Image (cartoon, rainbow, N blue to C red):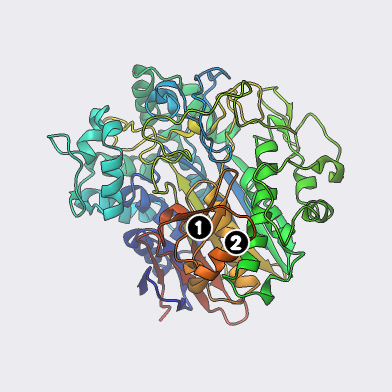
Amino acid sequence: MVFNHASGGIHDLVSAGGISSSAHPWATAAGVQMLLRGGNAVDAALATAFALVVCEPAMSHLGGQGHALVYMTSEGKSVALDFYATAPGAARPDLYEWVPSPTQGGYRFWTKGDANTTGALSVAVPGNMAGWLYLHQRWGTLPLDVLLEPSILYARRGVPLTPRMAAFAAESRARLAQFPAAAALFLRQDGSPRPAGDVVVQEDLARTLELIARGGMEVFYRGEIARAIVEMVQSAGGILTLEDLATYPEYRFRVLSPEEVDYRGSVIQATPPSSSVVLLQILNLLEGFPLGKYPPLSGEKLHLLVEAMKLAFADRLAYTGDPEFVDLPVEGLLAKSYAAERRSLLRSEQANAGNIPPGNPWAHQVSPRDEAGSGGNRSRGGLITSCGSSYSSRKDGLPLRVPSGVSKDGHRSDQSHTTHHSHVDRWGNFVSLTQSLGDAFGSALVVPGYGFFLNNAMKLFDPRPGGCNSIAPHKRPGTAPCPTLVLRDGRAVMALGSPSGTRIINAIAQTLIHVIDHGLGLQHAVNLPRVHWSGEELELEQDLPQETQKFLRDRGHVLQLRQARSPWFGAVQAVARDPESGLCQGAADPRRQGAVAGADPR
């Protein structure tokens, strides 16, 4: 095994036997173990996914949700899996009372009593197990109990808390303290958070993983585990039912074709529906400019990048929603003609104001609108909304109130939640997988006796009725995860992804541009300082060159400087493979305490 921790170095890890990259070294090791045992990229991804719930329990868990993008050489195509959480069947548009406040570009909504973020009402129907076990059933080659061996071992023997996990426990202390099962894991008896280095033994979780190894989908969604989830949620005032869980694998889990665009001769694919469109729009807009002639961190290049972000995120606010419930002009949004039309609004000499209106992609939609939605999937809930407008401020003109403990821009902290991992094997199969709980520790609810956290994905819905992203039974919220693949000549050559809310999209876009336009290696591309715009302010890592900062200010940008190498700007895990030589490369983002490792085929 060839192993590299994320660092400030710019050299890629290289291996001929396949590579795994994740945000925790033990999880990466679990993935590479499967490659060494003859498993493929899917086996590696699943071993890593389960290990991450043990090693990074604040970031994702069995009760969470996610997306995956898979390329299998035997099929010669990519397949997108959407196993994001859905609203319970009893959810209604007015479930919460909105607290007027910044929304982080339509991504985060505060409600009275934090009911959509903490406790039983914040829990949506979890999808991780449906997605992961589908991956195993369709493409896995090693037995499920083998894939779970590392995670069961880690849970039973204990995992030291990283500084990052300890920081999350401290930040979430008040939330965890409300629920005995969560407090028992991450708080001391006196209520103080457990410090970095403390070894967390998770025996209940180990037993649950053994149950899943034996019982698979059935035990989680219809059997013993399902009953425990519902009993706990309903006893705490939630609305999740056994029917919600039992119907998720068949009726809510989705197998889809990825969205894609051509970018400078490469095909960029991403998981639908909402974040993929924003990422691909940014690339479409920038394809009209010769970015490669500028240095990667030049003011000229970054000005164009930020302006493209503004245009793409303006459309995200207007056209985000579950395509089974809302009619989305995805074809129009990704049309090259639409990109050319919107590109005309991008001024190379002056920054646009932040309140750019959305465009009209319907004029570029070749397929007619129909009540089955943009993806051709008829809404099971029977609710179809045509999107084309959005709202993010009070109509009475009063200022938005910032909730207690939240900064003026709507951020609770500079920490990023969610986690991502990428894998490639010796045969050229790729997996890009993002998994999440929502916020750190999700709802803060742990299923007693089973040791796993439940999500708070309901926080991603707009609590105001009548919008594209408003709450409805069985609906998916607007999401940010965006697992991504790069194809050349019909073969996958690169997989990447990131955590951190709307910063996911921009972190991936910048990494792709560094590789494709500037010819950088993966690790160098991942390491470079980043910028971010999602609708409210321009954020920069403060180690961007001073001359670049001055250039941007001179163009009219107002800069919000943040800590360098901050996980707030995402944590890209990337792998690549040359299809001719079979040589694999990998990188892990130094913004998280992760690692990339390769399997030595000898």
Q: Are marks 2 and 1 in contact (CB under 8 Å)?
A: yes
Q: Residue at x 23, y 34 (%)?
A: 183
- Indicate the secondary structure of the residue bearing disc 2: helix
Q: Quick check: 41 above or below 481?
A: below
Please name the residue that numbered disc 1 is placed on: 540
Q: Residue at x 56, y 78 (%)?
A: 582
Q: Residue at x 57, y 38 (%)?
A: 253
Between 209 and 465, the residue placed more toward the observer is 465
Three-letter residue code for mark 1: Leu
Residue 342 is situated, as x and y percent measured from the top left of the image, at 78, 51
Percent from the top left, x then y, of residue 217?
46, 38
Q: Is residue 10 visible?
A: yes
Cα separation between marks 2 and 1: 11 Å
Q: Position of residue 359 (x, y in %)?
A: 77, 43
- Residue indicated by mark 2: 552
Whether 295 is drawn above or below 360: the answer is below
Left/right of residue 500 with respect to residue 183 in the rendered view: right
